Image (cartoon, grey):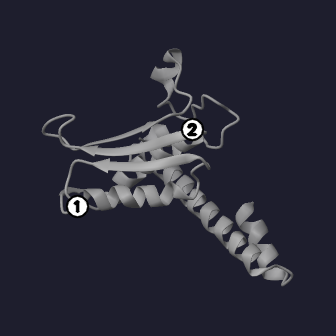
Amino acid sequence: NAIVGFSQLRAHSNDFSQEQVDEFVDLIDRNTDTLTNLIDDILSLSALENGKKLKLNIDTVLVNELCRNALATVKARCPEGVELRFTTEVDDSYSFISDSVRVQQVITNYLTNAEKHTDRGEIHLHCSLSERPGFLTFSVTDTGEGIPVSEQEHIFERLKKLNIFKQGTGLGLNIC
């Protein structure tokens, strides 16, 4: 709705200041990213549920670049007063072999989930080689409301939302 509404306002009226036009364009861009992520999640989930294998595009992936791209994807949606942080134990030249789109999709889903439930403080993406020796580990932590112990085993279920008043479909963590 935001994409259509602000696009129509922009297309059919010249009564806006450049600042307002820039704001409309920014809102259109952010909502386009949100819509694209939602469609990607639905397509991925549909493929998995129908027993289809996801098509993977395996290539060399620069770890820190991937993490920075994921952060850039969610930055515009980050609540005011919440700091997005990234720390890493690996050099910028460190790489691994994987599907960068799928790995970034998972990290982005975790970050987006953290944004929905963090009103103040920080969201921290960390990349580690020492947390679990022999493995590359990504972690997302936040200062949000937390997950009640009784719900922790259910958060990865399809369409599961702990707070129905928060934006989202309940697909992101299920895909992760």
Q: Which mark is residue 92?
A: 1
Q: Nearer the viewer, residue 76 or 81?
A: 81
Residue 143 location (% of width, % of height): 50, 34
| Earlier residue among tags 2 and 1 | 1
- Cα distance in 3D space between marks 2 and 1: 28 Å
Q: Around disc 2, counting alpha carbons within 10 Å, would you say few (fewer than 14), some (14 to 19), or many (20 or more)?
A: many
- Quadrant assignment, res 117: top right
Q: Residue at x 44, y 55 (%)?
A: 71
Q: Which residue is mark 2?
A: 118
- The residue furthest left is 134
- The residue furthest bottom is 14
Relative to 159, say whether 25 is above or below. Answer: below
Relative to 99, say whether 4 is above or below. Answer: below
**For the residue labelled by badge 2, is the local secondary structure a helix, a strand or a loop?**
loop
Q: Are marks 2 and 1 in contact (CB under 8 Å)?
A: no
Badge 1 amino acid:
Asp
The answer to whether residue 18 is seen in the rendering is yes
Residue 84 location (% of width, % of height): 47, 49
- The residue furthest top is 150
- Quadrant assignment, res 15: bottom right
**For the residue labelled by badge 1, is the local secondary structure a helix, a strand or a loop?**
loop
Badge 2 amino acid:
Thr
Residue 107 location (% of width, % of height): 40, 48
Q: Residue at x 46, y 60 (%)?
A: 72
Q: Nearer the viewer, residue 163 or 86?
A: 86
- Quadrant assignment, res 19: bottom right
Q: Residue at x 84, y 81 (%)?
A: 12
Q: Count the numbered circles shown.
A: 2
Q: Residue at x 19, y 34 (%)?
A: 132
